[in-house]
């Protein structure tokens, strides 16, 4: 896991208000606004080895966060890639998440396929549900790198086919707020990140991945695992404009598109209208589609 233009109506207005974004600016609905001096994304970025992933990453500009609504994918594991030390688990692990980079500190925050606590109180041997996670790298301030999961409680488990909305918003200096909700469940967490400052520039991202156990920084391992039919209904970036937080679509002109390690492992479909609001249907396969 390391991995101007015209705005449209704000997506998830009530969710943003609940996130308290107006602590640093009033929230408004943005329609047909031009963002003066907006920086456009670079044409390409190098892949970081270790996973099969599709990443959409913004320009390095005065962004405040990102949100999107997604139908969670179905999973077909490669039965030849079982974890030798953890019976019932695999060496491939699907994840779907947001994140960003500010002040030379990176975050990956979203959902990963995880173990759960069974009704009898025992931790499952198998990974059975998507569960929230938060990860940050270390920072020059001395803040340490950390990875944590949401508590192993059923109100924080999501399953393939369920629709969820995720948001990651910078709400104060050195603090972001992550919210995931859907299917009658909700998880919210404020997360300290010393590199994230309201006055600074940064970038935000959206990622769909097949992560691989103990493989970060190495070439991907061959696998037949497939993660199929994730459907992003919309994706938006947040920005402070004239003391107001506005939402703009995370469309093609606003992101660098990465499909790592190669394009052939991804099947991405989006109509013109879907692409205009940061929507698409996406599948990943360790056996190339083409």
Image: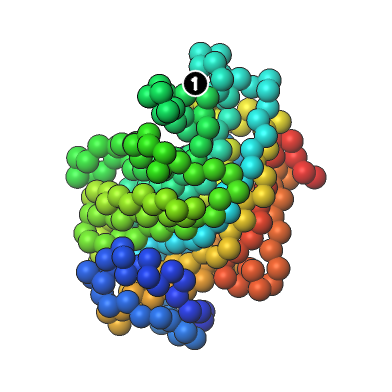
Q: Which residue is mark 1?
A: 125
Q: Is residue 2 visible?
A: no
Q: Residue furthest front?
A: 120
Residue furthest toward the left?
141
- Badge 1: residue crowd in 10 Å (few <14, some 14–19, many ≥20): some
Q: Secondary structure at mark 1?
A: strand
> Residue at position x 51%, y 13% from top?
85
Q: Quadrant of residue 38?
A: bottom left
Quadrant showing the C terminus: top right
Above/below status of 55 relative to 11: above
Measured from the top left, where is residue 124 in percent x and y? 47, 24
Q: Residue at x 21, y 59 (%)?
A: 173
**How many marks do you count on the picture?**
1
Q: Kindly identify the residue that appears in the image at 31 percent across and 63 percent down.
A: 19
Quadrant position of residue 14? bottom left
Q: Nearer the viewer, residue 173 or 71?
A: 71
In-image side of 66 versus 272 (left or right): left
Residue at the location (56% across, 20% down)?
88
**Is residue 92 in view from this perspective?**
yes
From the viewer's perspective, tell me whether residue 185 is left or right of residue 87. Answer: left
- In percent of width and height, residue 21 lies at 29, 68
Q: Residue furthest right?
A: 290
Position of residue 16 measured from the top left corner of the image (x, y, whole percent): 35, 67
Picture coordinates of residue 169 (x, y %)?
Answer: 34, 60
Front-most of residues 39 and 107: 107
In this picture the colour scheme is: rainbow
Using the image, determine if residue 148 lies above or below residue 9. Answer: above
């Amino acid at each position: 896991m390391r991995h101007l233009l015209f705005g449209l109506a704000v997506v998830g207005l009530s969710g943003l208000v609940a996130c308290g974004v107006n602590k640093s600016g009033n929230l408004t609905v943005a329609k047909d606004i031009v963002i003066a001096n907006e920086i456009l994304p670079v044409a390409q970025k190098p892949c970081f080895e270790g996973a099969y992933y599709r990443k959409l990453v913004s320009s390095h500009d005065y962004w405040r966060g990102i949100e999107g609504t997604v139908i969670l994918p179905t999973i077909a594991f490669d039965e030849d890639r079982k974890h030798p030390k953890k019976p019932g688990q695999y060496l491939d692990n699907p994840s779907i998440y947001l994140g960003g980079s500010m002040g030379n500190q990176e975050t990956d925050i979203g959902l990963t396929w995880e173990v759960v606590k069974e009704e009898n109180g025992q931790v499952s041997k198998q990974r059975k549900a998507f569960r929230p996670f938060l990860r940050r790298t270390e920072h020059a301030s001395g803040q340490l790198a950390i990875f944590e999961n949401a508590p192993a409680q059923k109100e924080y488990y999501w399953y393939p086919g369920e629709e969820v909305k995720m948001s990651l918003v910078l709400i104060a200096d050195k603090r972001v707020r992550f919210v995931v909700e859907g299917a009658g469940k909700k998880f919210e967490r404020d997360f300290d990140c010393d590199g994230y400052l309201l006055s600074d520039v940064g970038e935000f991202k959206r990622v769909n991945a097949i992560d691989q156990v103990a493989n970060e920084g190495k070439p991907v391992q061959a696998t037949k695992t497939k993660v199929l039919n994730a459907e992003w209904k919309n994706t938006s970036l947040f920005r402070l404009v004239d003391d107001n937080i506005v939402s703009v679509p995370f469309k093609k002109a606003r992101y660098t598109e990465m499909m790592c390690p190669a394009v052939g492992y991804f099947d991405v479909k989006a109509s013109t209208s879907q692409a205009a609001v940061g929507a698409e249907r996406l599948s990943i396969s360790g056996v190339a589609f083409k």
